[in-house]
Image (tube, coloured by chain):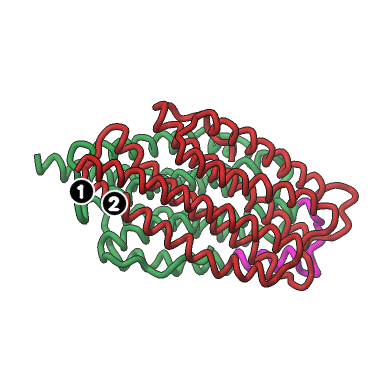
Chain colours: A red, B green
Amino acid sequence: MRDLYQEQLTGLADALADMCGQAALAMEHATRALLDADLQLAEQVIADDVRIDDLRVAAEEKAFGLLALQAPVATDLRVVISAIHGAGDIERMGDLALHVAQAARRRHPQSVLPDEVVPYFTEMGKIATALARKAGDVIRSRDVETAATLEADDDAMDDLHRHLFSVLMGPNWSHGVGPAVDITLLGRFYERYADHAVTVSRRVVYVVTGRMPGPLTV
Amino acid sequence: MRDLYQEQLTGLADALADMCGQAALAMEHATRALLDADLQLAEQVIADDVRIDDLRVAAEEKAFGLLALQAPVATDLRVVISAIHGAGDIERMGDLALHVAQAARRRHPQSVLPDEVVPYFTEMGKIATALARKAGDVIRSRDVETAATLEADDDAMDDLHRHLFSVLMGPNWSHGVGPAVDITLLGRFYERYADHAVTVSRRVVYVVTGRMPGPLTV
């Protein structure tokens, strides 16, 4: 019985980590679709989002089953509650990748991105994808040191996001309001995606150490 | 023991409904601060946000205590899990009201809003506030019919949000990129706030009926 219980807890963590992998892939593809104005890839991300939604439902059912049948307490209960929160965050990361893909599709065959902001989104895509993969690693390993590296990555994302605004509002912006509105929303999608990945990782730290790292500025 | 348990379940619902009231007030004040360029009111919303965060922690502790000590199953377990999700959603609504207040503060003593978008934000503020209050009512009453009215309010919000973009991108927009970027983000804050209120209400419907209403388009 006890072995089954531990297996179920591990299974729940694995399910969540797999979701992180899917959310990373979605953002990786969405970013490529955005940068290359690749309609087919955008469509694929949009179609595949339902799979992440299904994984969330499955993870929540696992957690629900654990609570109903095993009635965990103390740390194990915190693990299960964290997993329920985490599944919600990671599903949202999938939604944000979907929004990026939708933006790419909406403007196709044109590119959403004027040349001068391409490096920003290239970099934000890399950081976002790395954050999702690291969050998955932290879920599996419960390694607090890896969790700390997510904070630095998120700071880098915030810097890029702030700098992006200064480009949009700067004197050399020649593309008018429409592209600025698109890019404002896209920047927000990447920034929120990163915040959710950090939140997932922070909850693992909380479970391990009993202390929540300082608040996110969002 | 059974009475205490039912009291705890009711107490959890009350805590959540109170959070909705606080989040409604925050958005009501933030909107007034935005419309009137009222710095003092903006500062108040910003300072008060920590109270909503604290209410979330308290609600989650209540839920945690219920799970650990009462080990609820079936519908009661769903109620508690919904409350944990709901507390997260309502805290986020508070954050979004905070972001509106921060925008008002950032541009003070200037107004963030050119005259032609003032009616949009007046209306979006009213709908957002009403949605939060209704979500609180649904939590207390578990009334599925009231829950259905939130869907219509959210549709109205989405219409306003879409129309706002057509103003920003239309030929008569004379305020340039900076205000358009501000308004894009502000519009998104109201729209997300509404989505979270609807999500809270939908989870109550799910608990009552066992069926989740159709997906939100976000």
* Quadrant of the image containing the N terminus of chain B: top left
Q: Is residue B173 covered in magenta?
A: yes
| The magenta stretch spans residue A113 | no
Residue A102 drawn above or below residue A63: below
Question: What chain is tagged by disc 1?
Answer: A
Q: Pointer 1: what residue? A: A69
Q: Rate crowding at label 2 as few (under 14), some (14 to 19) or many (20 or more) other CA atoms within 10 Å.
A: many
Residue B214 position by quadrant = bottom left
Residues in magenta, as a range: B160-178
In which quadrant is the C terminus of chain B drawn? bottom right
Q: Residues within 10 Å of mark 1 (few under 14, many from 20)?
A: few
- Quarter of the rendering containing residue B105: top right
Q: Residue at x 20, y 48 (%)?
A: A69
Image coordinates for residue A149, horizontal then vertical, percent: 60, 32
Mark 2 residue element: helix
Q: Secondary structure at mark 1?
A: helix
Which residue, as the protein is rendered here, is positioned at the far front?
A: A3
Foreground residue among A27 and B168: A27
In the drawing, does residue B94 fall left or right of residue B35? Answer: left
> Which of the chains bears the disc numbered 2?
A
Give x and y (percent) for residue B2: 10, 43
The disc label shown at residue A64, or none: 2
Q: Position of residue A162 (x, y in %)?
A: 73, 42
Of residues B209 and A75, the one nearer the viewer is: A75
**Of the residues shown, which amino acid type is indicated by label 2?**
Phe
Do badges 2 and 1 share one subunit? yes
Q: Is residue A49 above or below residue A202?
A: below
On screen, residue A142 above or below B13: above
What's the distance in space between the residues labelled 2 and 1, CA to CA? Answer: 8 Å
Q: Main secondary structure of the magenta part?
A: helix
Residue A127 in view of the camera: yes
Residue type at mark 1: give it: Leu
